[in-house]
Amino acid sequence: DGRDDRVGCSQGRDAGHAAGHGEPPDLRLVEARPDAGGGVDHELDLAVLQVVRDVRATLGDLLDMVVAAPLPEQVGELEVVAVDDCSSDETWSELDSWRPSPRQDGCRVTIVRERHPQNRGKGAALRTGFAAASGEVLLIQDADLEYDPAEYPKLLEPLLNGVADAVYGARFLGGPHRVLYFWHSVANRMLTT
C-alpha cells in the first residue's frame, strides 16, 4: 500500500523538552547562494519530521494537518517522519495505527515511524528522524503546532527558487532576512567598530 512502517530502536539518557506557542514564523534565509539559478526544476520529495512525546490526544490531528498542508507543485511525495521519544501515554499506539488520507493534489504520502524505548531528548530524536528520512528537503514540524503547516509554501519558497540552502522559522524577525556570510560579518564588524 506504499506505506513505510519501519520502526527503529535507540537507547540513551533522559532529557526534557520545553514547548511554547506563538505567532506564525517569519523567515530567515541562511547562507543565501550567490550562484542562485532557476531553482528546482524537477519533482522532489519533502520529508516532514515530528518529534512526538506524550501527545496521544492531539497526534492524529497534528499528522492530519501535516498531510493536508498546502504544498508547492514541485513536491511529488510527502514523507511524514514521526519519532516517538519514549512516550509514557499511548502516543506510540496512536502513531502505529494512524494512516494518512490521500491528498487532493495527488501528491504521494508515506509514513516512517521511529521509536526510542528511553527518552533521549529532542536532539537525539531529531538525529533519529534525520537518519530515517529519505526526502530531498527536510522540514521540522513541532508537535505542539508552534508553526502552522499552512506556512509550508512560505518556508519552502526560497529553497525551491534556488536563493537559499536552508530556511529557519523565527517568530520575532518581522519578515524574511538574509544571514550574512561569516567573513562579511567579520568585515562589517571591523569597519563599524
Image (cartoon, rainbow, N blue to C red):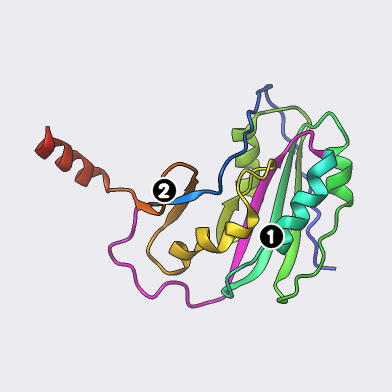
- Mark 1 falls on what kind of element? strand
Q: Give amino acid for label 2.
A: Gly
Q: Which residue is mark 2?
A: 174
Residue 9 picture location, percent across and down = 76, 37
Using the rendered view, name the quadrant where residue 118 is placed. Answer: top right
Residue visible at 17% across and 37% down? 189
Q: Quadrant of the C terminus?
A: top left
* Residue holding disc 1: 79
Q: Which residues are magenta?
A: 31-55
**Which one is closest to the eye, mark 1 or mark 2?**
2
- Mark 1 or mark 2, which has the lower sequence index? 1
In this view, 148 is above or below 13 = below
Return the x and y of residue 79 as percentages of the image width and height. 69, 60
Q: Amino acid at mark 1?
A: Glu
Please say whether residue 140 is visible from this viewpoint.
yes
Q: Is residue 56 left or right of residue 34?
A: right
State how far apart marks 1 and 2 are (Cα).
30 Å
